[in-house]
Image (cartoon, rainbow, N blue to C red):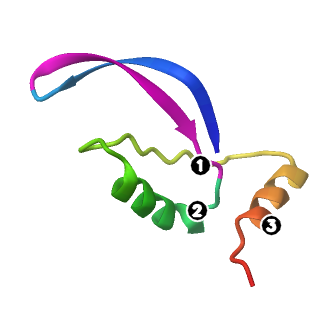
Amino acid sequence: MLQIAEVRSLYRWDGAVQNDREQLVTCKTTAAAVPALRDLILRMHPYEEPEFIVQPIVDGSDGYLAWIETETAPGP
């Protein structure tokens, strides 16, 4: 998980423009692990509608992609 120190978010919510400090978090995982990650974030996040975006990996180094597969595999 990568957490960037702080971001400023400007967005409209409930008909009003919001201007908030937030933490931006990026989680690196596999497509197979996305449903469990989504469930965890939606269950634990304090926002009514937290941002949850999945970006496909269209290319990458073989070693790095293999590392993601290894590190996200179910344990014994």
Q: Judging from the image, what secondary structure is the residue with disc 2 in?
A: helix
Residue at x 72% of width, y 78% of height = 75
Residue at x 37% of width, y 48% of height = 45
Badge 3 or badge 1: first in the primary sequence = 1
Q: Which quadrant of the view contains residue 22?
A: top left
Q: Which residue is mark 2?
A: 31
Q: Are marks 3 and 2 in contact (CB under 8 Å)?
A: no
Q: Is residue 68 above or below residue 2?
A: below
Q: How far is disc 3 from disc 1 in space, using C-alphas? A: 18 Å
Q: Nearer the viewer, mark 3 or mark 2?
A: 3
Q: Are marks 2 and 1 in contact (CB under 8 Å)?
A: yes
Q: Quadrant of the N terminus?
A: top right
User: In x, y percent, where is residue 5?
Assistant: 58, 23
Q: Judging from the image, what secondary structure is the residue with disc 1 in?
A: loop
Tell me if residue 16 is in the magenta stretch: yes
Given the image, on which type of amino acid does mark 3 rest? Thr
The disc at residue 70 is: 3
Q: How far is disc 3 from disc 2 in space, using C-alphas? A: 13 Å
Tell me if residue 74 is in the magenta stretch: no
Badge 2 or badge 1: first in the primary sequence = 2
Range shown magenta:
15-28
* Closer to the camera in the image, 56 or 44: 44
Residue at x 83% of width, y 58% of height = 67
Q: How far is disc 2 from disc 1 in space, using C-alphas? A: 8 Å
Given the image, on which type of amino acid does mark 1 rest? Pro
Q: Nearer the viewer, mark 3 or mark 1?
A: 3
The disc at residue 56 is: 1
Q: Which quadrant of the view contains residue 55?
A: top right
